[in-house]
Every structure is written in structure tokens, then in C-alpha cells.
């Protein structure tokens, strides 16, 4: 992992041999960076095998900011986000944490932001769809899985 601090345009770089670097920002909280790491690991596990098969000897990079008009890239991002949410917050544990104390308990238990916890709860049909996403207007905020879930 490397601290991007505004220096790198990529969230993930995979070398031709499959080793990889996830770029994190010191401007994000640890909870936000947990989500970023899980998303990038999702890209490595889900998408690298396809890229490697189609382009032997090449590496792969995932930009930090995607062109939202590129449907294929956005689909890859959604897949990585879904992977990340399930990886960080397994359903049975989410249900247990939710029953034990609500959104704060889920967020604390899994060391994720409340937005990530809320999105996972919604995806599992646990929390009402009307829940607000508080950080959505923060320009430094990289959307978590809630931003791209199908409605």
C-alpha cells in the first residue's frame, strides 16, 4: 500500500507478475481506507484474471476517478464495490451487529463508515431506503457501494 496524498491517479496498480499496490490517501479516515482497500482487492480478484488472459505480459491499473460515461468501467466498479461490502461485512455478522445496536454498532464492528454500513444494510433489505447518506456532498469523498447500487 502507498499513501497517494494527491500524487497518483490510480487506486490500484497490478504488475504483470500479479503483484499489486493499493494507493491510499492520508486525507481519508481509516474506515474510508478500509473500503478503498477492499474495493481494490475486489478489482484484483475479479478483474485481473480477465485482463491477464486478454493481455498476456501486461499489467492493469484502476483509476481513482472513473469516467462515469464508460459503462464497462462503471460495471467493474460496481462489482468491486459489491465484493468489498460482502468481504468486509458478511451477512450473518451484519444481521447480528444490527440487532445488537443499529447502524453505529454495524459501523463500529466492521470498522467502516456509517455510509458503507447503511448501504450494506439496505442491500440486505435491513434498513429503510429513506436513510440519508450524510457525506455524499463532501468533494473529498470517494463514493462507497451506496453510490452505485441498482435501485
Image (cartoon, rainbow, N blue to C red):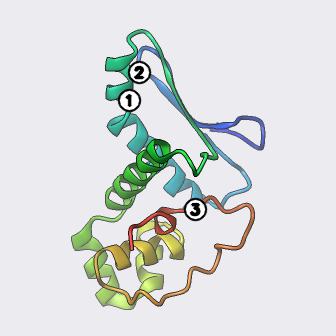
| SS state under label 1 | helix
The answer to whether marks 2 and 3 mark residues whose Cβ atoms lie closer than 8 Å is: no
Q: Residues within 10 Å of mark 3 (few under 14, many from 20)?
A: some
The answer to whether marks 2 and 1 mark residues whose Cβ atoms lie closer than 8 Å is: yes
Quarter of the picture holding the N terminus:
top right
Q: Position of residue 13 (x, y in %)?
A: 55, 29
Lower sequence index among marks 3 and 1: 1
Query: Is 3 rendered above or below residue 124?
Result: above
Give me the disc on residue 48: 1
Give me the disc on residue 143: 3
Q: Position of residue 93 (x, y in %)?
A: 27, 72
Which quadrant holds residue 87? bottom left
Write the residue at 52% across / 62% down. 144
The residue wearing badge 2 is 18
Is 126 positioned to the left or the right of 115 in the image? left
Lower sequence index among marks 2 and 1: 2
Q: Position of residue 137 (x, y in %)?
A: 70, 73
Q: Residues within 10 Å of mark 1 (few under 14, many from 20)?
A: some
Quarter of the picture holding the C terminus:
bottom left
Lower sequence index among marks 2 and 3: 2
Residue placed farthest to the right in the image?
A: 6
Depth order, front residue of 78/90: 78
Write the residue at 50% across / 47% down. 37
Write the residue at 32% across / 27% down. 49
| SS state under label 3 | loop
Query: Is 111 rendered above or below residue 125?
Result: above
Amino acid at each position: 500500500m502507498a499513501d497517494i496524498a494527491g500524487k497518483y491517479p490510480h487506486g490500484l496498480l497490478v504488475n504483470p507478475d500479479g503483484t499489486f499496490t493499493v494507493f491510499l490517501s492520508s486525507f481519508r479516515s481509516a474506515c474510508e481506507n478500509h473500503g478503498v482497500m477492499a474495493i481494490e482487492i475486489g478489482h484484483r480478484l475479479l478483474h485481473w484474471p480477465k485482463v491477464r488472459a486478454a493481455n498476456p505480459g501486461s499489467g492493469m491499473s484502476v483509476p481513482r476517478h472513473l469516467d462515469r460515461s464508460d459503462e464497462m468501467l462503471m460495471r467493474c466498479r460496481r462489482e468491486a464495490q459489491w465484493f468489498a461490502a460482502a468481504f468486509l461485512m458478511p451477512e450473518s455478522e451484519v444481521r447480528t451487529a444490527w440487532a445488537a445496536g443499529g447502524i453505529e454498532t454495524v459501523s463500529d464492528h466492521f470498522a467502516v463508515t456509517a455510509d458503507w454500513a447503511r448501504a450494506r444494510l439496505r442491500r440486505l433489505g435491513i434498513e429503510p431506503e429513506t436513510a440519508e447518506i450524510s457525506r455524499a456532498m463532501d468533494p473529498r469523498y470517494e463514493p462507497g457501494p451506496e453510490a452505485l447500487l441498482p435501485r
